[in-house]
Each structure stands twice: as C-alpha cells, then as structure tokens.
C-alpha cells in the first residue's frame, strides 16, 4: 500500500482551491509504489495524480526532479509535470507533507512485456537521454556504486536470515564488480529505476514514463543496464528472455547509439545494478518487521540475475 498519509475530502478540496483545475469529484488511494503517498484525483475539469512526499523523499531534491520533468516535457517526452497553482507555485504543503498536483497520463504498465513493447520502451529511454544532454542540473546518486559496500556492512550478518552464506557471496561479488567498475564513461541525468511498472503503454506505444524520484546524475549506460535487469527476467529472476533483452538494446540504440566502451561495460554495469537492488531489498528485508503491512521484495531475485550475468554475456 502506498498511502502513508491520509487526506480528508475537506483538506483536498481546500488544496484544489489553490488551482484552476475544477472542483473535487473523487479521490482514491493508489496502491502501487513504495516511497510516497499517491491519490488519483478527479475534478470537474480533469484527472490528476496527487503525490505527498514521505520521509524517504527529501524535499531538497524536489526542485531537481521537477526541473528534469519540465525539461523532458518541453522536448516532447511523455512525462508527468507537476502543475503550478494560480500563483505559479508547484511544490505545496498538504497534511504536513510537501505535495504536488501532477498531470495524469493514460496507459497501463505491462507485467509481461513483448519484444515490440520492450523496443518501444528502450527507444523512449534513448530519447530521454538524448534530450537530457543539455540539462544542466545535477544530483549525486544516493545509491551509486560507492554506497554499496557501506550498505552491505549496515545490513551485516542479518542477510544470513535471507539465505545462509549470502553475506560472503555478496561481499565477493561486490569486490569483483567494484574492481571493474568503469570511471570514464559519459555521465548525465538518468532515471535509474525504469522498471516495467514505471512505463505506461497503450498497445506497443509508450504513453508515459513515470516515477523519477530516484533520478540522479550517474553513468548514462548504467540506466540502460538497470532497465535490462528489470525487463529481461521474470519476477523471480529465474528466466532470462533474450528477445526482450535484444529489443531493449535495439530500441535504445535506434535513438542513442552506444560507444564501443559503453557496450563493453554493459555486463559490469548490469552486475552493479543487480547488487544495488539486491542490497536495498536486503536492507528492507532485514529492517522491516515480519508482521508489518508491507510486501517485502525478495532480494534473491536479484542474486539470481547477478549470477546469470556473471555466467554468460547476456548482451551478446
């Protein structure tokens, strides 16, 4: 459930009165997502998404996220902009939280993408990277490669409750990936979390790229590697679909060609992406009470992906 902060109809009506966006008809909490509270809001004028930013999202980062979305939208990318009130202010306060009224985009996220859908999504990422080439703002990646070992150490031997021996196996894999981690590839603003549930589609057409709250400045090809790990495997990380993997890369390079160095680095970048998601899931697993009303994501799904990338060149 992704509604941590509840908003009364009266408070939401007062909030909407700051905008010229019609009067409240209905509001429904959205279960998807794990970081912030989201509502689907319908007014007499249109539909919107209301997002209240919880403690996991620093309000200091919101100007970067919103500027990035405005930049992409101005270039024609299907991303959801935060809407300003009648005084031109986008970042509001509601129920003790920073809040934004956000454009509603049509489309649905696909659980089992086809190669054609994967190609379209890869091309959409390529366009985003191309259009962000002149985006001047920067935000360090709070979950970048330099943070992975400290995160493993904070998890500690608690990861043994997930699977015996996991700490040492992850420690060894981490050492190997960091030793090979590229330091001279092009860096830019990236999404860094483009899982299938963050891409909205109608048929084979991408109608929305959403959830930019992990966006940061990092290796551009790492963004593509993250996407490859998320789209090319089943949810448990047991089955790799080479057709999906090829379609993603082909779609991306149809818009944003990769250099020889970027292509060569993709296997290492993908292993790093697996470690990033394994470690954040492990942290949540170790630190979330077993009886909490939260569905913990299986860290081993990303260990299995990591193992697959280590055994074979899945980008061949």
Image (cartoon, rainbow, N blue to C red):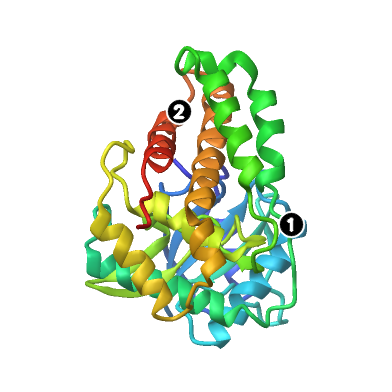
Farthest residue to the right: give it.
60
What is the CA distance from the residue labelled 1 to the residue labelled 2?
Answer: 32 Å
Horizontal and vertical percent position of residue 147:
70, 40
Q: Quadrant of the N terminus?
A: top left
- The quadrant of the rendering that contains the C terminus is bottom left
Q: Position of residue 224 (x, y in %)?
A: 48, 61
Q: Residue at x 39, y 39 (%)?
A: 305
Q: Nearer the viewer, residue 294 or 246?
A: 246
Counting the numbered discs, the total is 2
- Residue 274 lies, with reference to residue 164, above or below; the image says below
Q: Which class describes the residues within 10 Å of circle 1: few (<14), some (14-19), or many (20+)?
A: few
**Front in this rendered view, residue 111 or 26:** 111
In front: 204, or 294?
Answer: 204
Bin the neighbour count of mark 2 within 10 Å (Cα to Cα): few under 14, some 14-19, many 20 and up: few
Q: Which residue is mark 1?
A: 140
The reply to whether discs 1 and 2 touch (Cβ–Cβ < 8 Å) is no
Counting from the top left corner in percent of width and height, residue 11 is at 59, 57
Name the residue rendered at 59%, 72% in the picture. Answer: 82
Q: Which mark is residue 22?
A: none
Please give left or right for residue 85 compared with residue 81 in the image. Answer: right
Farthest residue in the bottom direction? 75
- Work out whether 11 lies above or below 157: below
Residue 51, visible in the rendered structure: yes
Query: For this rendering, which residue is in front, 49 or 110?
Result: 110
- From the top left corner, tell me how far across and down residue 100 is, in percent: 61, 65
Q: Residue at x 58, y 15 (%)?
A: 158
Q: Secondary structure at mark 2?
A: loop
In the rendered structure, which disc, 1 or 2, sits on the residue that comes first in sequence? Answer: 1
| Residue that appears at 61% across and 79% down | 70
Q: Which residue is mark 2?
A: 293
Kindly report which numbered mark, 1 or 2, lies closer to the viewer in this rendering.
1
Q: Secondary structure at mark 1?
A: loop
């Amino acid at each position: 459930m992704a509604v941590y902060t509840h908003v009364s109809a009266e408070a939401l009506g007062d909030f909407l009165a700051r905008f010229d966006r019609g009067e409240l008809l209905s509001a429904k909490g959205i279960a998807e997502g794990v970081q912030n509270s989201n509502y689907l809001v319908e007014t007499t004028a249109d539909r919107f998404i209301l997002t209240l930013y919880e403690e996991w999202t620093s309000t200091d980062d919101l100007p970067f996220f919103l500027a990035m979305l405005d930049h992409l939208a101005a270039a024609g990318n299907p991303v959801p902009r935060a809407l300003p009130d009648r005084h031109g202010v986008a970042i509001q306060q509601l129920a003790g939280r920073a809040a934004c009224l956000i454009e509603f985009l049509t489309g649905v996220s696909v659980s089992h993408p086809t190669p054609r859908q994967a190609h379209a999504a890869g091309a959409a990422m390529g366009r985003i990277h191309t259009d962000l080439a002149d985006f001047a703002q920067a935000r360090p990646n709070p979950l970048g490669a330099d943070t992975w070992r400290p995160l493993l150490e904070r998890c500690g031997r608690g990861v043994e409750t997930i699977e015996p021996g996991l700490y040492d196996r992850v420690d060894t894999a981490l050492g190997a990936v960091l030793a090979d981690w590229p330091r001279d590839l092009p860096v830019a603003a990236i999404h860094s979390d483009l899982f299938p549930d963050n891409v909205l589609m109608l048929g084979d057409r991408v109608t929305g790229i959403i959830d930019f709250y992990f966006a940061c400045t990092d290796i551009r090809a790492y963004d593509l590697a993250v996407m490859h790990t998320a789209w090319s495997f089943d949810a448990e990380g047991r089955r790799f679909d080479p057709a999906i993997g090829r379609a993603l890369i082909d779609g991306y390079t149809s818009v944003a060609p990769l250099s020889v160095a970027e292509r060569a680095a993709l296997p290492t970048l993908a292993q790093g992406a697996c470690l990033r998601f394994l470690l954040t899931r492990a942290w949540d697993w170790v630190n979330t009470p077993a009886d909490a009303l939260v569905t913990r994501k299986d860290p081993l799904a990303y260990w299995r992906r990591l193992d697959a990338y280590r055994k074979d060149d899945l980008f061949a």
